[in-house]
Amino acid sequence: MPRERIELRSADEVARIRDACAIVRDVLAEVAEAVEPGVTTGEIDRLAEALTEARGAKPAFKGYHGYPAVLCISLNDEVVHGIPSPGRRLRSGDIVGLDFGVVYRGWFGDSAVTVPVGKISASARRLLDTTREALGAGIDAVRPDGRLGDVGAAVQRHVEAKGYSVVRDFVGHGIGRKLHEPPQVPNFGAPRSGPRLRPGMVLAIEPMVNAGGPDVRVLGDGWTAVTVDGSLSAHFEHTVAVTEDGPAVLTCS
Ligand code: MF3
Ligand code: CO
């Protein structure tokens, strides 16, 4: 199979992606602040839509393969791609994944966080912390002379050391002119394998971590992915550029 070409962006192009990512970061921070017991996921989605419009950007997910909302909001055992709904009310103790992307002046940015609703259990807290740390470990593995497999290996190592599983059925991705570009960015694999990382590559790194086993299934709505064993799942994502000096996290700088 021919290897797909991975785009290399100029410093100026990376700056344009950074502009999109700044909007993603700001909107995601504001919608995360709105998460509290009693709020519906539909209300959070409407807030995200209004904030995106106010910034002059377009939501990247709405209409993507027919996806019906601005955010993906995934609660508890939902892994990714939960559809916001006016009938879905957050309760204290829930964990809520908020995944959000925009296109701004032709460039895409993508990020996700998982946040607590009210007071959560110590085990849920540990899952969130581990998943956030695993994203950090993946980002730290980005080196201009490294390989893509170093990223997945670093994520997997951190997650499995804590007794959790990385999801195999969904992966991160290149990003830039489209939401999803080559290469796929798995959260598992072998170090020193896969394509070489080069300055100018832009990757969305997005570990999905299950407290139990790695298996997921998609519900009858055609979108919502849940853990097969009913265990909790968390998801964090940043858009990251490979630079001569290492990773530049575009969705948090
Ligand atoms: N959240 C996915 C990602 O981070 C993309 C979701 S597109 C949607 O790559 F249409 F499913 F929302
Ligand atoms: Co993504």
Image (cartoon, rainbow, N blue to C red):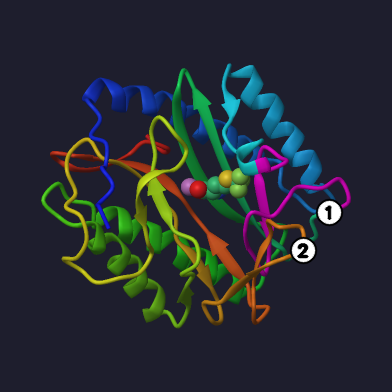
Residue 203 versus residue 188 in the image, above or below: above
Q: Position of residue 197 (x, y in %)?
A: 19, 49
Q: Name the residue under label 1.
A: 88
Would you say 76 lies left or right of 193 here? right
**Image quadrant where one finds the C terminus:** top left
Residue 166 versus residue 103 in the image, above or below: below
Amino acid type, mark 1: Arg
Q: Residues within 10 Å of mark 1 (few under 14, many from 20)?
A: some
N-term mark: 2 or 1: 1
What residue do we see at 68% from left, 41% from top? 66
What residue do we see at 59% from left, 76% from top? 123
Q: Nearer the viewer, residue 51 or 110?
A: 110
Q: Are marks 2 and 1 in contact (CB under 8 Å)?
A: no
Q: What element carries label 1?
A: loop
Q: Where is residue 136 in the image (x, y as percent from the top left)?
A: 35, 56
Residue 52, visible in the rendered structure: yes
Write down the region rendered in magenta.
66-89
Amino acid type, mark 2: Gly
Residue 99, visible in the rendered structure: no
* Residue 230 location, quadrant: bottom right
In three-dimensional space, the C-alpha distance between marks 2 and 1, rounded to whole angstroms, equals 17 Å
Q: Mark 2 points at which residue?
A: 220
Q: How crowded is mark 2: few (under 14 residues within 10 Å), some or many (20 or more)?
A: few
Q: Which of 76 and 38 is in front in this view?
A: 76
**Image quadrant where one finds the N terminus:** bottom left
Question: Magenta region's main secondary structure?
Answer: loop
Q: Position of residue 184 (x, y in %)?
A: 37, 54
Q: What element carries label 2?
A: loop
In this rendering, the label closer to the viewer, 2 or 1: 2
